[in-house]
Amino acid sequence: MSKRRTRSKFLHQIDTLIGWAIFEKELHKVCKRSTHDAAGRAAYSPLVLFKMMLLQTWYNLSNMGVEDMVNDTSPANAFCGGLRVEDTVPDHSTLSRFRSELFEKRAMNRLLKTLNLQA
């Protein structure tokens, strides 16, 4: 089986297996963000950012590497919520700030523990 098919199958299985609503609720409590950025564009969903962080961990990617992966591969894009072609993928600095926020608020371990219990 090719790497592409293996990756696609794995991400689809995880996406189906995990109850993401629990994470979305927790992330919105932790990350009290406005719905729009300073330029008036819609803000990124914390769940999309969290899923990108999971991809980073599972595939040993840098912030820029996961940004490229979500931009370039359909399975990764679908896993992160199916960003449209006209949507911009969160960039490496956005991911870095999001990760820092989760660690500062001591939410990361709690989120990963919940993920492991569901998996």
Image (cartoon, rainbow, N blue to C red):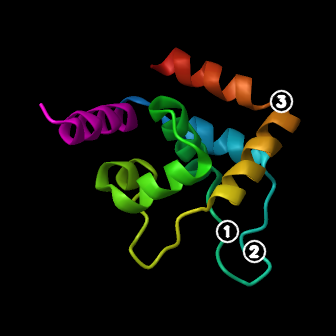
Q: Nearer the viewer, residue 95 or 35?
A: 95
Q: What's the residue at 67%, 52% (across, down)?
A: 95
Three-letter residue code for mark 2? Asp
Name the spot of residue 14 as percent of width and height, x first: 38, 32
**Which label was assigned to residue 37?**
2
Secondary structure type for disc 1? loop
Mark 1–mark 2 Cα distance, whole angstroms, equals 5 Å
Residue 10, by quadrant, is: top left
Three-letter residue code for mark 3? Arg
Three-letter residue code for mark 1? Ala
Mark 1 and mark 2 in contact? Answer it, CB < 8 Å.
yes
Mark 1–mark 3 Cα distance, whole angstroms, equals 22 Å
In the picture, which quadrant includes the N terminus?
A: top left
Earlier residue among tags 1 and 2: 2
**Which label was assigned to residue 106?**
3
Mark 3, residues whose alpha carbon is within 10 Å: few (<14), some, or many (≥20)? few
The range drawn in magenta is 1-16
Secondary structure type for disc 3? loop
Q: State left or right for residue 21 relative to residue 59.
A: right
